Amino acid sequence: MLKDITLGQYFPGTSIIHRLDPRVKLIALIVYIVALFLAGGIVSYALCTGFAVAAIAISGIKPKLILKSLKAIIFIVLFTAVLNMLYTPGDVLVSFWIIKITKQGIFTGFGMGLRVILLVTVSALLTYTTSPMALTDGLENLLSPLKKIHVPVHEFAMMMTIALRFIPTLIEETDKIMSAQKARGADFESGNIVKRARALIPVLIPLFVSSFRRADELATAMECRLYHGGNGRTRLNTLRYGKIDGVGGLVIALVCAAVIVVSKVFGL
């Protein structure tokens, strides 16, 4: 299961999605999330799904990687769908004891599950096609107006990107520790929830120690390179908008507008 979590990994490529400005991709993600939660009908859900599928196809990212990233949220998707299915009022289709499944509940549960899947898919696609440095530069540039009120934008963007970058590293470290513990006879799969939680203690302690050690090594490396934050910092590659970024922004704007019109005006 741990190896299926691919969030935070970057896969180099030359596709249009890879070459988009990171600021455009960040704004596009926000706009897509807004459109996704404004969708309320089959047609609007189809538009959101079609956009996600098209983006994956254009990026050249293997669908197998996307499916691997979704394995970790299967429980959340099912739990969300079932809750909405059982507690949404409407036309009752099945009634048993205190359980009532309605027609509206089935549609709402399906919609919420699809939203979670598409949200994770498109968010993962952002990290798959954007390097950590580009993501940091784009996020810092978008938040730069906050510098006027003395918000440490550079440090904030750096912390977020480092945290995202170390997700695959921590997952790999956790997998190694669990494999070593299993070789010593540890059992993480049998027993009730309390026993499983106790079995994870021998994993968590060395994981925390390893994380603190990595953080200390990273801080030492940054100090040796005379890193002192965003003041006076220069960049090798300056972000510039191009024609491809204008086209990408226009496409996501049209998709969002289409979802709003279809869902809110026509109710589809």
Image: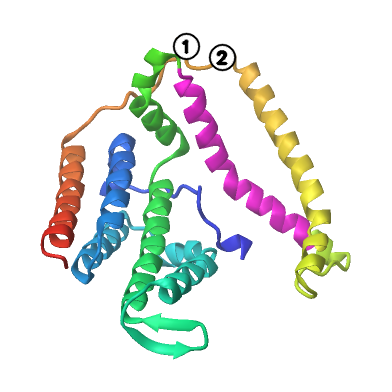
* Residue bearing the label numbered 1: 231
Q: Is residue 62 visible?
A: no
Q: Residue at x 53, y 17 (%)?
A: 229
- Magenta residues span 151-179
Asked if residue 38 lies left or right of residue 98, the reply is left
Locate residue 3: give its quadrant. bottom right
Q: Residue at x 11, y 64 (%)?
A: 266
Query: Where residue 159 sits in the image (x, y, percent)?
Result: 54, 31
Where disc 2 sits, the SS reads loop
Outermost residue on the top side: it is 232
Residue 161 shown in magenta: yes
Q: Main secondary structure of the magenta part?
A: helix
Locate residue 107: give its quadrant. bottom left
Q: Amino acid at mark 1?
A: Asn
* Residue bearing the label numbered 2: 228
Q: Is residue 176 above or below residue 161?
A: below
Query: Where residue 268 sits in the image (x, y, percent)?
Result: 16, 68
Q: Amino acid at mark 2?
A: His
Query: Where residue 210 sits in the image (x, y, percent)?
Result: 75, 41
Asked if residue 193 lies left or right of residue 245, the reply is right
Asked if the residues shown at circle 2 and circle 1 are in contact, with their CB atoms under 8 angstroms apart, the answer is: yes
Alpha carbon separation for disc pair 2 and 1: 7 Å
